[in-house]
């Protein structure tokens, strides 16, 4: 039998990263402020998790100016979506086996 | 905690975050209930305004005769605008309160998106109804208000609670009936804007509050 936890991805192991990916699975481009509101975390904490997801090419970042205000939006990459889906399926399998 | 439980918590959390980020969850059942009560009071006021001295019930729920801009027309218009104003104010208040309790920003992107999809059919419907009023063709005013309001709810329902879709369809149905049975359109108006709001408000309140 295939190892049920082989698809469990270390990179999604924090609640914040799990949350970021959940939001980006259902919203095309999401603003920093939306992520912050849904996840209820501090700016610094959120930014560091976003950074590491970006470094792993799981999400992409777009920085724009709206008037004079900077606006940062995020989107899950195709690869990120695939990995996250696999991660979810692995979680579900683990639940059934538990 | 065993690992099955923690997986389960993860999955539940994922689902809740997906919902929170796509749906306008601050909409309160109390908003709908208060709007319904205000509309019913407005309908009673309309019924009193329509008193032409004949004492006939059926004449007073029939909004079809042209008023030729007599005083009753202006009273009814003021009545309708007052209902719209008060219902919106109470509606916003109760939803704002619920947002505070849920620890959500009230004017977030889900609220903006819901309002946007609600507003487009609503504004078109408002303009169309004003055209009917300006042409002094009041026969289909109640019908058009109900139909366009129903369409607005139907469009917005994708971004908030699913029940709103059935509420929208019910409003559209009542609007069509009001268009067929124009001689008692005030009754359909009271059913659609009054009773239906109260019923769906109670459903939403029980399920989500």
Image (cartoon, coloured by chain):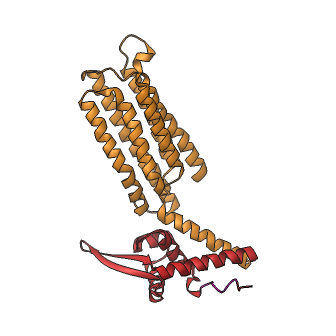
Which chain is painted in orange?
Answer: B
Q: Quadrant of residue B15?
A: bottom right
Q: Is residue A92 above or below residue B90?
A: below
Which sits in the foreground, A84 or B9? Answer: A84
Q: Is residue B200 above or below residue B60?
A: below
Name the residue: 28% across, 32% down: B132
In the picture as drawn, the residue positioned furthest to the bottom comes out as A55
Which sits in the foreground, B28 or B177? Answer: B177
Name the residue: 39% across, 33% down: B143
Name the residue: 31% across, 44% down: B124
Magenta part of the chain: A4-9
Horizontal relation, residue B3 to residue B77: left or right: right
In the picture as drawn, the residue positioned furthest to the top comes out as B54
Residue B54 within the segment the image draws in magenta: no
Q: Quadrant of residue B184?
A: top left
In the picture as drawn, the residue positioned furthest to the front comes out as A1
Count of numbered badges drawn on the protein: 0
Which chain is painted in red?
Answer: A
Q: Is residue B137 above or below residue A70?
A: above
Q: Is residue B139 above or below residue A73?
A: above
Rendered location of residue B112, percent (x, y): 38, 58
Name the residue: 38% across, 31% down: B142
Secondary structure mostly seen in magenta is loop
Rendered location of residue B158, percent (x, y): 47, 55
């Amino acid at each position: 039998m295939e190892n049920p936890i082989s698809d469990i991805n270390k990179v999604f192991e924090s609640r914040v990263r799990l949350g970021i990916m959940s939001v980006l699975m259902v919203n095309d481009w999401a603003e920093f402020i939306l992520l912050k509101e849904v996840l209820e975390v501090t700016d610094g904490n959120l930014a560091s998790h976003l950074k590491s997801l970006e470094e792993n090419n799981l999400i992409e970042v777009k920085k724009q100016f709206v008037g004079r205000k900077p606006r940062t939006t995020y989107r899950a990459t195709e690869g990120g979506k695939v990995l996250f889906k696999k991660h979810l399926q692995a979680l579900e399998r683990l639940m059934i086996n538990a | 905690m065993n690992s099955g439980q923690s997986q389960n918590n993860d999955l539940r959390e994922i689902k809740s975050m997906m919902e929170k980020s796509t749906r306008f969850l601050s909409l309160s059942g109390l908003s709908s209930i208060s709007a319904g009560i205000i509309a019913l009071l407005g309908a009673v006021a309309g019924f009193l305004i329509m008193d032409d001295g004949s004492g006939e019930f059926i004449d007073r729920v029939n909004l079809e005769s042209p008023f030729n801009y007599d005083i009753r027309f202006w009273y009814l218009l003021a009545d309708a605008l007052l209902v719209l104003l008060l219902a919106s104010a109470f509606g916003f208040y109760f939803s704002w309160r619920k947002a505070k309790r849920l620890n959500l920003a009230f004017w977030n992107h889900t609220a903006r998106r819901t309002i946007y999809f609600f507003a487009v059919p609503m504004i078109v419907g408002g303009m169309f109804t004003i055209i009917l009023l300006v042409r002094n063709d009041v026969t289909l005013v109640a019908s058009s208000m109900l139909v366009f309001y129903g369409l607005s709810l139907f469009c917005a329902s994708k971004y908030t609670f699913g029940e709103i879709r059935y509420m929208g369809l019910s409003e559209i149905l009542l609007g069509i009936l009001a268009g067929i049975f124009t001689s008692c359109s005030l009754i359909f108006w009271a059913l659609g804007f009054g009773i239906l709001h109260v019923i769906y408000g109670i459903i939403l309140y029980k399920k989500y509050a």
